Amino acid sequence: MPDRTMLLWDEPEGRSSGWSATARGSLEAHLGIPRPEWSADDLVRFARGRGIRLVSLMHGGGDGWLKTLDFVPRSDAHLLDILDAGERADGSSLFGSLGIPPDASDIVLRPRLQTASLDPFAAVPTLAVLCGHAGRDGRPLAVSPDTIVRRAYERLFEETGIRLEALGEVEFFLGRRASEEDVYGADDRGYHAASPFVFGQALRRRALTCLADMGIPVRYGHSEVGYIEARSPGGVLWEQHEIELDLLPLPDAADAVLLTQWVLRNLAHREGMQCSTEPMMSEAHAGNGLHFHFSPRRRGAHLGGRDVDGRLTDPTRWLVAGLVRWGDALMAFGNRVPSSFKRVRQGREAPHAIVWGEYDRSALVRLPMNATTEDGRTVAPPTIEFRLPDGSAHPHLVLAGAAQAMCDAAADGAELDALLERTRTGHGDGGRPVPHGFPAVADALLGARSVLEAGGVFPAALVDRTLESLRGRRG
């Protein structure tokens, strides 16, 4: 047990004021303990031995951005208190737009110790821990997006036996001042381009290693097709990149997207660049999607795609049908800014109709192919891809909505076959169009509210506030 006396921490002898990259590294490697087994005592021992000076409680806000609350621990006892109990916060400032009034605004940040990592950007040694949110009664805060995605994840398991995993494809533009050296870029020719034909390769690779050290599994990164020339000498030149994360349980997949965007923005700021996930940066140019891949899993087996007889597995049918039926309503959480509709109307690999298909990149939902070895072994689980969300998405609410849609479809049984046949690309009636404005999204959300609120997952007040916001917006 660490010493709980109130002795001030001392800087370890011989440590410089700099916080070197080699000193950071992976917290799991430093501790020598598997992440699921971490305790508060383990983190305190590490903090004392490594001279940790700051602790940052990180969490997702109602706006879909990462937030931080920072501490300077005075002693082992103080740090243990932070890790065990968390700290109070103003919920009306964090979630006021989702339904928390100022007269009932006290909430508590609850640290999740297994999410701890070393902040790769801090000037002094800093331990960062992701948190959930609790109300005054100590229970998970109903309106918190973190609570909502966790409830949806558990409800899906309770009703279907499926553990739904997901990964995000985080697309982003890097911008910097144009110079005479920028002679290689060209629109639609940047896909998988290598340096020197792209300037952001080094930053993207640093992001991959930062994420790995933070315990976030990454599948790959590459440059993307988007490229926007500077409009004037010395103006900002933009090029597009993508980081595809790896499969995680739904709540962790949502956190991984927030952390990835945070890492990218920090790195860009340090390099004097800009980083944007805006859905549409410029007319007639590629926009930033935030596609999600899903893998339904039961008893350790991934059940996405087709079975050995070539039929869609039941979990695949449930998810595809749920997204086809309610995907336009999820735009309330996945397509949240006016340029979201410019991206959809432009239709460059953005869905324009609510249909599904295999390999079809213009569909709302698609079943992508998988790489296999020469003997036919797949090297990654088959996935179901939801292609409508964009860079404005709130990942926790989108993923929670997808789980709720899957639950709804699973209750329909044989009714799904007709829906799937009718909305399959090249076979049905072409599907209904994707909404092109906030009022149409509001109509879709109103029709889906009973699905989202089922099982007490989405609070009615949150849906009401979202409808009110959509009705009052242009786009």
Image (cartoon, helix red, strand yellow):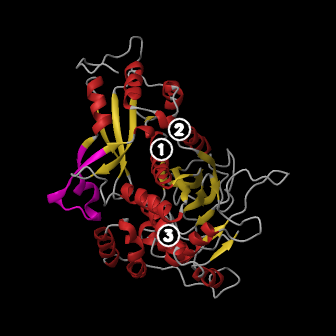
Q: Residue at x 28, y 52 (%)?
A: 139
* Residue 252 locus on image (x, y percent): 48, 50
Q: Which amino acid does label 1 sit on?
A: Val
Q: Which amino acid does label 3 sit on?
A: Cys
Inspect this view and state whether residue 43 appears.
yes
Is any part of residue 125 visible from this angle? Answer: no
* Residue indicated by mark 3: 407
The residue where tag 2 is placed is: 210
**Numbered disc in front, either 1 or 3:** 3
- Near-viewer residue (37 or 386): 37
Residue 204 in the figure: left or right of residue 474: right
Residue 186 in picture, x, y percent from top left: 66, 58
Which stretch is magenta? 88-109
- What residue appears at the point 39 percent right and 11 percent down from the top-left corner? 13
Mark identifier at residue 165:
none
Q: Are marks 2 and 1 in contact (CB under 8 Å)?
A: yes
